[in-house]
Image (spheres, rainbow, N blue to C red):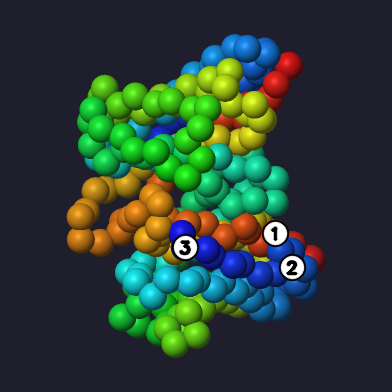
């Protein structure tokens, strides 16, 4: 079945540690996105990528980094500079269309907590 | 930056009743307004979406109503069922910082009582 796979489902970070969240999709989508979800909040965009080897900062990019070396993969690194990393992280992908927005399809998230 | 205001924050409805969730956006440039449904521990799933060339779209028990002049759109769930209990998010295109992407409302937690 086509879809988006996020791993791990749960992740714990120690102080001063960088951690990387995996996102893989087999939908052949060009665009991929990372969101952060906090209780009672909507989804806030961290980074997005419209095409391989290119990505843009979203609304809350500070303390995060990404790479997009392959179309299928868009890993997110939560760096030690992110002082409040505890959240539910969601990856999404969509068809890229310059003219019109297309539906975004989400993975089942990674829950990150601080030890 | 585009803001999307969603209300209510939480909603309790009896089985068989109508659930209504409202969203308001700010920017007049738009082309796509989706609603997502999210169950605990899962990612959001696209429920229904509307493009503003129509004022209403219906899919089964779910209907989006779009009011262009008021810059509002709403989700109606007819004959609400306990299985509809979830958090619902509306979204609108962002024409601010991360232009071309979606800005999400803060969500409405729906509980349908048997």
Q: Residue at x 20, y 61 (%)?
A: A99
Given residues A9 and B22, the one toward you in this image is B22
Say whether residue A20 is left or right of residue B54.
right
Task: Say which chain tag 3 marks.
Answer: B
- Residue farthest bottom in this picture: B69
Element on which disc 1 rests: strand
Given residues B1 and A6, the one toward you in this image is B1
Q: Contact (CB < 8 A) between labels 1 and 2?
A: yes
Res. B40 in view: yes
Q: Which mark is residue A22?
A: none
Q: Earlier in the sequence, mark 3 or mark 2?
A: 3
Given residues B110 and B59, the one toward you in this image is B110
- Residue farthest left in this picture: A98
Q: Give the spatial CA distance, label 3 vs label 2.
A: 25 Å
Element on which disc 2 rests: strand
Q: Which mark is residue B109?
A: 1
Q: Earlier in the sequence, mark 1 or mark 2?
A: 2
Label 2 sits on residue: B11
Say whether residue B37 is left or right of residue A84.
left
Do the residues indicated by labels 1 and 3 lie within the same chain of the protein? yes
């Amino acid at each position: 079945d086509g879809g988006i796979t996020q791993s791990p489902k749960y992740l714990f970070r120690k102080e001063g540690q960088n951690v990387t969240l995996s996102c893989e999709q087999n939908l052949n989508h060009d665009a991929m996105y990372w969101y952060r979800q906090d209780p009672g909040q909507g989804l806030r965009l961290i980074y997005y990528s419209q095409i391989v080897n290119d990505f843009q900062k979203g609304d809350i990019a500070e303390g995060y980094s990404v790479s997009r070396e392959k179309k299928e993969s868009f890993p997110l690194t939560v760096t030690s500079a992110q002082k409040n990393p505890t959240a539910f992280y969601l990856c999404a992908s969509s068809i890229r269309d310059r003219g019109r927005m297309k539906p975004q399809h989400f993975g089942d998230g990674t829950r990150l907590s601080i030890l | 930056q585009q803001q999307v205001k969603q209300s209510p924050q939480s909603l309790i409805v009896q089985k068989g009743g109508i659930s209504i969730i409202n969203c308001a956006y700010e920017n007049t440039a738009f082309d796509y307004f989706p609603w997502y449904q999210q169950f605990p521990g899962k990612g959001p799933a696209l429920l229904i979406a509307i493009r503003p060339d129509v004022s209403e779209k219906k899919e089964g028990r779910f209907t989006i109503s779009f009011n262009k002049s008021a810059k509002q759109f709403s989700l109606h769930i007819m004959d609400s069922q306990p299985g509809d209990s979830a958090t619902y998010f509306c979204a609108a295109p962002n024409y601010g910082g991360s232009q071309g992407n979606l800005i999400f409302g803060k969500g409405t937690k729906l509980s349908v009582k048997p």
